[in-house]
Image: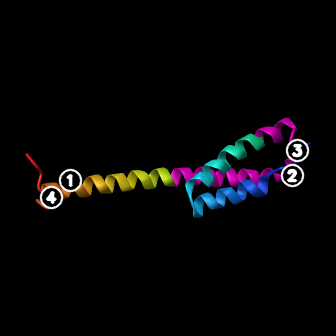
Amino acid sequence: MEEHRGNLILIFGILGLVVCAPFGIAAWIMGNGDLKKMAAGQMDPEGEGLTKAGKICGIITLVLYIVLFILVALFLLLGFGAAILGGGIQATQ
């Protein structure tokens, strides 16, 4: 039986929240795979709680980064639109 990687997945999930999104994505993917193996009896189920927590952190990371990306894009679009309409930036003809 394969040993669980719950600690690693949880660390990746937390790093995804704190440092950068790729860690969160890795936690989500690794968590999915390991939970499937645990359900099939191929992996030690002792780390199931840690694995689920890491996977959830990975999901939260991805959702937060998508929301942040959308907010930044809207801010930039609205900011440039207001600048053009307000005469701050001259539109070329």
- Between tags 2 and 1, which lies in front? 1
Please identify the residue farthest to the top as the structure is shown. Answer: 40
Front one among 65 and 60: 65
Q: Is residue 47 left or right of residue 93?
A: right
Task: Tell me if label 3 and label 1 are in contact, CB under 8 Å.
Answer: no
Please identify the residue farthest to the front as the structure is shown. Answer: 92
Circle 3 SS class = loop
Crowding at dot 3, Cα within 10 Å, few <14 / some 14-19 / many 20+, comes out as few
2 or 3: tag closer to the N-terminus: 3
Residue type highlighted by circle 3: Glu
Question: At 51% from the left edge and 55% from the top edge, which residue is drawn?
Answer: 64
3 or 1: tag closer to the N-terminus: 3
4 or 1: tag closer to the N-terminus: 1
Question: At 75% from the left edge and 51% from the top edge, which residue is drawn?
Answer: 51
Crowding at dot 2, Cα within 10 Å, few <14 / some 14-19 / many 20+, comes out as few
The percent coordinates of residue 70 (x first, y second) are 40, 51
- C-alpha span from label 4 to label 3: 62 Å
Q: In the rendered image, which residue does mark 2 sit on?
A: 46
Circle 4 SS class = loop
Span shown in magenta: 36-64
Q: In the rendered image, which residue does mark 3 sit on?
A: 2
Q: In the rendered image, which residue does mark 1 sit on?
A: 81
Crowding at dot 4, Cα within 10 Å, few <14 / some 14-19 / many 20+, comes out as few
Q: In the rendered image, which residue does mark 4 sit on?
A: 89
Question: At 37% from the left edge and 56% from the top edge, which residue is drawn?
Answer: 72
The quadrant holding residue 93 is: top left
Q: Is residue 69 left or right of residue 91?
A: right
Residue type highlighted by circle 4: Ile
- C-alpha span from label 2 to label 3: 11 Å
* Magenta part, dominant SS: helix
